[in-house]
Amino acid sequence: MLAEINGKIPLLIEDKTQTKNHSGQLTRYIESVEKEYRVKEFPAIYFKTFDQCNYATIEKAGYGIYLRSDMLGVLRTGIERGVRDQVVLDFYQYLTAIEEAVQAYSTTAVVNWKRDCWIGFFLKLQSKFADGSWDYVPNKGGGFMGFWWHRQENKYLQLEENVLAFKIEVKDRANQSSQRNTWYKRLTASKGASSLTIVRPSRFGRGRWMTAATLGEDYRQTDHAGMLHFENTVQTMRKAELASVCPESVVIRGISLGD
């Protein structure tokens, strides 16, 4: 969307819902406006109705970020001051419904989580794991919502919804199986005082990105009602970090091997 302020100042607005920036489109939009208006500096806004992992590339392209929470704040203020325009009221209700669905991870039993709950959970995790990224990951099995973090050289951790996986990236096809198997054996031949249980994945698979091992149970910690206990869940993920760096700190199936 392109608007003019006072008939001469361009205002560029990119309105994104459930899609993301792609194919260098944001830079092309700015270049087009610069050429048309013969200006080098003008306001450009990236308005995101839903959520995405981060906005670094968008800011780098020269856009200011305007999120759902920003718009909700403006609409809420207007309504509190007496605005009764039906378009405003409908849009406020629409955005409120999205926000409530995303935040429902904290009020919904983990066994009933849908896509929006995973998004809210992953957004919350980013406040604890600064290197965390998330997105929908498509695959032959139908795909999943994933969160990955704690990359150490070619190894990293990944949440595949209710599964915590120890992942490895191997570009050389000839060494993929051997490197995956070596790390699997290292992870599942350790000892210590942690309560983690690390097991063989349901299938190893092949390719550049592979699962070497998984946590033996759902990493999400819950209360008596099956609701997420966020801080305890973070502690479990921290233990997995330690295990991925120093597997000697975990217990396999609750059995402590000899020193």
Image: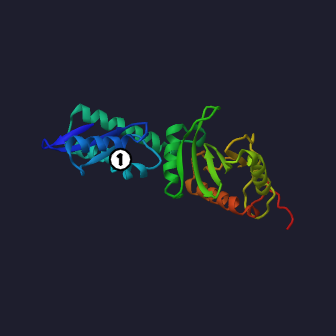
Q: Residue at x 45, y 50 (%)?
A: 54
In the foreground, 209 or 242: 209
Q: Residues within 10 Å of mark 1 (few under 14, many from 20)?
A: some
List x then y, in percent, for residue 60.
38, 52
Q: Does residue 113 appear in this view?
A: yes
Q: Residue at x 72, y 56 (%)?
A: 196
Residue at mark 1: 69
Q: Would you say 74 lies left or right of 159 here?
A: left
Q: Would you say 227 lies left or right of 174 here?
A: left
Picture quadrant where residue 203 is located: top right
Q: Is residue 247 above or below residue 122?
A: below
List x then y, in percent, for residue 148.
58, 50
- Quarter of the image where the N terminus is located: top left
Check disc 1 and give the amino acid type: Ser
Q: Would you say 149 lies left or right of 29 here?
A: right
Q: How many marks?
A: 1
List x then y, in percent, for residue 129.
54, 57
Q: Is residue 231 above or below residue 58?
A: below
Report helix, strand or loop for mark 1.
Answer: helix
Q: Identify the residue at the far right of this view.
A: 258
Picture quadrant where residue 163 is located: top right
Q: Residue at x 69, y 41 (%)?
A: 207
Q: Does residue 220 appear in this view?
A: no
